[in-house]
Amino acid sequence: MTASGMLAQIKKDFFKGVNLSAASKLEGDARRTFRLLQVERLLTEKMGNDPLAKWLSDMFWTADEGRQLMMSPHPLLSPQEQQGLTDREMGHLRLILEIAGLCHDLSLHYSFDLKEAFGIKDHLWVMNKQLVEWLTTTEYEQIAMHTTYILKKHAISVYAFGHYLPAQDELADLYSLKYRQLVGIPYSTTIPPREYVKILLDEMLRIERHWWRGRKLKLRPDLVMLHDELFGAIPHQFNKRVLKAAQELYDYMDTQLYGQLTKNEHNYMGTSWDDLPKSVKRKTEEILERFANKIREVRDQYLPQGWLADDSLAFSYLMEHGHRCGYGWWREEDEAL
């Protein structure tokens, strides 16, 4: 199919009744508004189980991040083929590509340029006040819902990189009691868009404010995480007794555990557990068992009976934290979060 024929088919399938000729002459905010109106429509209307936004994206790019071409050479993106288009058709194509690009990122949930898309500060984080205001007030509810999900995905990856496991899991497994469902991918939810945005933003803000409350109290990053790991979740406030327990674990890790596994296993980094010598396995198990006993000691001294059972998620968080410390990955969260 020629470039002209493919363009005509796209206009028929995705932009029937839309005056692309007039819209292609728009600039600045007016052009951005037109783009958003079309993307909102394409995210709302479906063909089968997928929104038209995804179908339009698939006309040009694969589902890969970075907009890999669906076909190469692509008739509509080939300079040679484009020579057969009129100036009017080229104007339509440029506008359609702008719309399809945002459709790609939103429908497939990839990060994108907020400044270009919405005209706001380009910082994909819940502490971006401009972004939160835009998401909670915009008329483009589908765009807001998909953008908020992208924001959630990005936050989970940041927390995972920083080993802030309670925050990572809390966002990943966020559940709405009101709607009795996980607050998951937009395509599979029955939560209304505005409610969906509010639920996710409220939780992300709660986590972030808790983190910075700890920093304002001059708590070290690992101490904040140990406090939250003892809870097995992100609590609404810092508990003095839990902080004392966290401080004891912190001191033990800093003086008795840090680097101990590295010293014993530096010649076996990258080797699977099954392939390690028995002596190294035994030494590793002894070091980690001493840390587990320290957790139990702190639990019995500071925490209510029944809290922090050996088979609890909180206990596994602490053991993973200790494992990282033993390998020498300690206090790196200062840079990660």
Image (spheres, grey):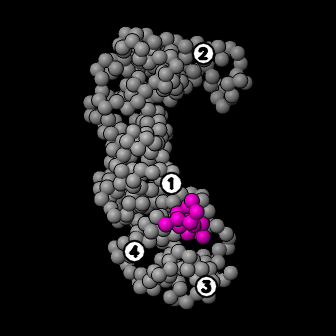
The residue indicated by pointer 4 is 34
Query: Disc 1 on helix, strand or loop?
Result: helix
The residue indicated by pointer 2 is 285
Q: Nearer the viewer, mark 1 or mark 2?
A: 1
Residue pictured at 33% horizontal, 64% vertical: 139
Q: Mark 1 to mark 3: distance in Å?
A: 33 Å
* Callout 4 touching callout 3 (CB < 8 Å): no
The residue indicated by pointer 3 is 4
The first of marks 4 and 3 along the sequence is 3
- In percent of width and height, residue 41 lies at 44, 68
Q: Mark 3 to mark 2: distance in Å?
A: 68 Å
The amino acid pointed to by label 2 is Glu
Q: Nearer the viewer, mark 1 or mark 3?
A: 1
- The quadrant the N terminus occupies is bottom right
Q: Mark 4 to mark 1: distance in Å?
A: 24 Å
Q: Mark 2 to mark 4: distance in Å?
A: 62 Å
The residue indicated by pointer 1 is 187
Task: Find the magenta span and give its range.
Answer: 45-59
